[in-house]
Structures are given as C-alpha cells and as structure tokens.
Image (spheres, rainbow, N blue to C red):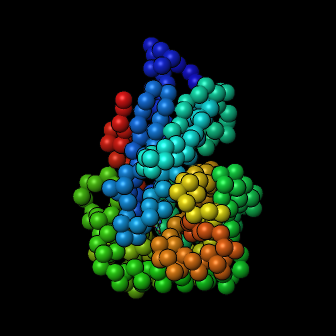
Amino acid sequence: MGYSDGVGPSDQVSVDARRAVEDAVWAPSVHNTQPWRFGLHGARISLSADADRRLDVADPDGREMLISCGAALYNLRCSLRALGYAPRVRMLPDPDRPHLLADVDLEPGEPADQQALRERAQIRRRRTHRGGFRPDPVPAGVLTAMRYDAEREGARLVEAVDAHVKGALAALTEAAEHVQQRIPAHTAEMARWAPSPRTGRADGVQEGAYPQRSPQAVPQTVPHFADRDFARGHGWGVQVAPDAPGVGAGVVGLALLLVSGGDAPADWLRSGQAMQRLLLRAAEGDLAVAFHTQALEVPELRAFISARFCGGGHPQMLLRLGVAEGEGLESVRRPVEEVIEAT
Ligand SMILES: Cc1cc2nc3c(=O)[nH]c(=O)nc-3n(C[C@H](O)[C@H](O)[C@H](O)COP(=O)(O)O)c2cc1C
C-alpha cells in the first residue's frame, strides 16, 4: 500500500479501489455479458449483479451470471492483495438485496508478495481459448495447484481421466448444442450477445474472439467438444492459416469439471472465484482454457452429469486445459465508468 505522488491516505484508497475494479472487469463472463456493477464507497467496494444482463433463456436462475460475478470478485481480491491490502469479503451481506453479491473492505495488509503480483499480472493476459491444443503435456504440478486452488475457494476440480467419461462429456456438449439451436428464443439470445462485426460494441463475443470455421471443417479436437456457434453461419471469425501446425488435428487437452457441494447463489459465487483462481494459475503456467458449458444449461443434461460424473455434486463449469494452438484471441470490455457507481 504505497502512496502515489501528492495523494493523501484516503485518496490513495480511492485510487486503489478504482484500480482493483479496472482489473475486476477482465474476468470472464458468459457470452461476455459483463453482468456486474461496482459501488465505490470510501474503503469499501460493493459488487452487485446487473440482472438486465442475465441470459433469460440459457440462464434463468442466474447461475452463470453469479459465476461470472464470482470471477470478478476473485480479481478484486487478487488485485487488492497485490496493491498491499488485506481485503475482507462479506458475500451476500443483505438478504433483502439479493443482487448485492459482496462487500469488500480494503483493510491495511502486508506489502504485496511476489505470488500476488504474478497472479495479478495474469488478469489481463488471460483469454478464453477456442479450438484445439498442442500435444504438449500439462505439467502435473500445475494441475495439482489448480485442484488446490479450487478447494481453497470451496469447490472441487475433477479431471475426466477415463476416455469414455471424456467422450460422454463431449457427446453431451454436442447434444446440448443441438437442443439449444432448435429453440428460437435461444438463437435470438445468442444473436444478441454475438453481434455482427464492426458494431463497435464493448461487450458480447466479437468476431476477433473465435476462429472462423468452414462448412467442411474437420472437428478440431478428438473427442470433439462442440464450440458455440457465435458466427451463426455468417462466416465470421478469425482466419486460421490452413497449413498452421496441428490445425484440424488439435488435441482435446484435459477435460475438467468444476464441482460444488451445494447449488445456491453462495455456491455459484464461490465457484466463480474458484474458477478465476485456477484460470489465473493456468495462465501463469502458459496454459490455456476453453469453456464448454452448453450441457450445463440444459437441466436434464446437467442432472445427468451430476449423477454420473460428479458423485451427486453440482457441476458448475466444463473446461478443457492445454497448451494453446495458434494465436491468442481478442476480447473487449466496457469502460469502467459504465460499471462504477461512486458515492
Ligand atoms: C459461466 C461461463 C460460461 C461460459 N461458457 C462458454 C462456452 O460455453 N463457450 C465459450 O466459448 N466460452 C464460454 N465462456 C467464456 C466467455 O465467452 C468469455 O469469458 C467472454 O467472451 C470474455 O472473453 P475472455 O474470457 O477471453 O476475456 C463462458 C464464461 C463463463 C464465465
């Protein structure tokens, strides 16, 4: 907690709170909806869900919205620790205001340690990966650390080691993709959040965020985990050189389920924090993570995955982990002014 030139202690807290929010918004969010608002009240930052940005069709209960906000909450905590504070978090502090997700108090802490600084440095570097991975193995130490990260945040990271479990998860993802594409309200919702190129929007999944696919494209991974159809047949997306090494033959990487014991808003918030903590850990190890959450948005398929592959625990995220094939993709965020309310 060092003072900037010409800035007094309470001003410094305000400067640092704003910096932490600038980091928080780089959290992943479902369809890049960025469903959050931050209140700055002196040494307190409050985080609220912006329910206008919830996916009414895919996420009527707001589970994915709260996972996204949980990821932003983890970024806040991480950033504040790196700035030399000991953030004190109260989750869901007011039962009468369910959209108020957390109050975070900036208490004086120890000088930032190297780990906090390294972790914070990953916040803006991390991107969602879409496509195959290189055959390079994932170092066992990183996976062990990611498991530990999940447990420290109150969730569990389960690897689908068995080839048949992995194949079943891929098949369920594909099935969910077909089920969802048959629902006009679902495709309309996708269209809202995967806008056509050059709209200049600072949210949603933009063209620079996913690879272009040709109609005859060979599945990029085996077993094949279906990607979301953000281009919706328009041919949008980043062009991938056809002779790039491994294109069309990318490997699937490790398939991972993030699982929680309960399935209430507090569990979703915790799962979001666990997810972000392990995503930053992966980024620090130069590993990339792809998300495939379609099956978890179809209640019957989610219940099936819970019963068969999570021992009755609640699957919150389905991820693939590996060494990225190809260039990093782009992402956008709204300016923080749009999400900050100062009092
Ligand atoms: C709860 C949740 C579910 C997600 N599901 C998917 C998914 O099924 N497919 C996908 O490509 N990305 C998925 N994402 C990633 C978001 O699309 C991504 O975070 C967002 O577009 C911002 O991009 P960035 O992560 O590169 O910053 C998901 C993210 C969250 C938090």
The residue under the point 44% across, 80% down is 177
Which corner quadrant of the image does residue 264 belong to?
A: bottom right
Which corner quadrant of the image does residue 207 belong to?
A: bottom left
Which part of the image, by quadrant, shows the C terminus? Answer: top left
The residue under the point 32% across, 56% down is 52
Please, is residue 155 above or below residue 119 in the view?
below
Residue that lies at the very extreme toward the left in this rendered image: 199
Residue 161 picture location, percent across and down: 71, 75
Note whether residue 100 is visible.
yes
Q: Nearer the viewer, residue 27 or 233?
A: 27
Count of marks overlaid on the render: 0
Which part of the image, by quadrant, shows the N terminus? Answer: top right
Q: Is residue 150 left or right of residue 302?
A: right
The residue under the point 66% across, 73% down is 312
Q: Which of 322 and 275 is in front in this view?
A: 275
Note whether residue 24 is visible.
no
The residue under the point 45% across, 16% down is 7
Please, is residue 304 above or below residue 196 in the view?
below
Residue 78 picture location, percent across and down: 58, 41
Residue 328 picture location, percent across and down: 48, 58
Please, is residue 153 above or below residue 137 in the view?
above
Residue that lies at the very extreme toward the front in this rendered image: 96
Residue 163 picture location, percent across and down: 68, 82
